[in-house]
């Protein structure tokens, strides 16, 4: 299967992304979207937990975060050792307040969760963790009280669940309806559009923020569009690459607060961030985009 680097080289987009820092610098800022029920907003393009963060490669991760911060990025998803890698770099740049960091914390004894939350917040230069969620969907309802207590004690600002897979959407939707989450993180894209049928409208109706994972289906998307020319009508919504084609489709859904892009390559990061500028496809164009990808 073709990977993204090979795809960029094949399609000639490497030169485009190399030129994009200047283009992005001339624009105002990435589109922000309000967290429901608050006056706080998140830039719509975020960073997932890339290999450079997980490998604790602070040099590579630092370059990535510098680009992200320079171009107005805000949300970084960080699990495991990435929490401290991101925190260390953010503090070294005096950027802790600029970053909104999504953390993962599994349920345990309250004393242990409280201690971990405090230690991670200190490592990230935060008075409280911005967001704590868990991938443990099965036990979230049972353990909701633990997360709520962290929030009530001022150790955490937002809580939620992060899980991909359409088979989980009904369960996540019930958590949304029952008011047990501030954020959900789910998969939604041109290849996996099912969340738009019920889950994303439920989140919007119930004031729950939505972060999106798997925008490129772990790279499979680039294999699907390999060798194809970007349609001319993509220019109508300021789309300059196939990566932006996917990201702008996702961001066009008003329920989406932020889409998480996972890369360790600065050129890819710049290309992804470009999706946060300019226009977005309308409903008719979104339908045309879906039809194009389904026809591949």
Image: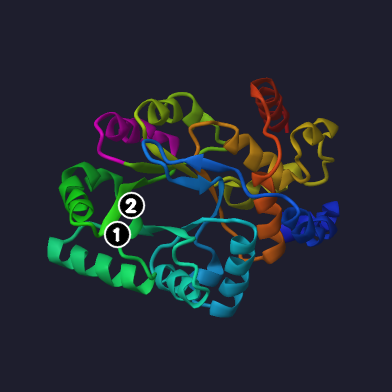
The front one of 46 and 163 is: 46
Q: Residue at x 63, y 52 (%)?
A: 219
Q: Which residues are magenta?
A: 165-181
Crowding at dot 1, Cα within 10 Å, few <14 / some 14-19 / many 20+, comes out as: some
Taking 292 as reference, is 69 left or right? Answer: left
Q: Which of the two discs, 2 and 1, labels the residue nearer the N terminus?
A: 1
The overriding secondary structure of the stretch rendered in magenta is helix
Crowding at dot 2, Cα within 10 Å, few <14 / some 14-19 / many 20+, comes out as: many
Q: Residue at x 26, y 44 (%)?
A: 138
| In the image, residue 110 above or below residue 29 | below
Q: Residue at x 81, y 39 (%)?
A: 230
How far apart are the alpha carbons under marks 2 and 1? 6 Å
Taking 3 as reference, is 118 left or right? Answer: left
Taking 242 as reference, is 30 left or right? Answer: left
Which quadrant: the C terminus? top right
- Disc 1 designates what residue? 105
Q: Which mark is residue 133?
A: 2
Name the spot of residue 106 as percent of width and height, x first.
26, 58
Name the spot of residue 73 as percent of width and height, x first.
57, 56
The front one of 50 and 155 is: 155
């Amino acid at each position: 299967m073709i990977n993204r680097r090979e795809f960029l080289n094949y399609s000639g987009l490497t030169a485009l992304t190399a030129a994009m820092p200047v283009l992005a610098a001339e624009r105002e800022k990435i589109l922000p979207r309000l967290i429901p029920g608050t006056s706080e907003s998140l830039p719509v393009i975020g960073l997932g937990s890339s290999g450079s963060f997980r490998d604790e490669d602070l040099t590579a991760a630092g370059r990535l975060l510098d680009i992200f911060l320079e171009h107005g990025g805000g949300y970084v998803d960080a699990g495991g050792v990435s929490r401290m890698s991101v925190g260390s770099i953010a503090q070294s740049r005096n950027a802790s307040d600029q970053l909104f960091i999504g953390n993962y914390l599994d349920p345990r004894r309250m004393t242990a969760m409280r201690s971990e939350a405090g230690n991670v917040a200190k490592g990230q230069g935060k008075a409280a963790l911005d967001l704590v969620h868990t991938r443990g969907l099965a036990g979230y309802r049972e353990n909701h009280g633990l997360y709520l207590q962290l929030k009530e004690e001022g150790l955490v600002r937002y809580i939620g669940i992060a899980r991909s897979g359409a088979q989980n959407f009904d369960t996540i939707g019930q958590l949304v309806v029952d008011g047990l989450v501030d954020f959900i993180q789910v998969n939604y894209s041109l290849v996996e559009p099912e969340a738009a049928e019920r889950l994303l409208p439920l989140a919007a109706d119930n004031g729950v923020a939505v972060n999106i994972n798997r925008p490129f289906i772990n790279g499979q998307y680039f294999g699907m569009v390999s060798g194809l020319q970007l349609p001319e009508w993509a220019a109508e919504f300021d789309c300059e690459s196939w990566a932006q084609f996917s990201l702008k489709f996702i961001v066009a859904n008003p329920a989406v607060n932020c889409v998480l892009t996972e890369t360790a390559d600065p050129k890819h990061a710049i290309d992804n961030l470009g999706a946060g500028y300019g226009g977005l496809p309308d409903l008719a164009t979104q339908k045309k985009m879906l039809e194009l990808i389904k026809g591949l």
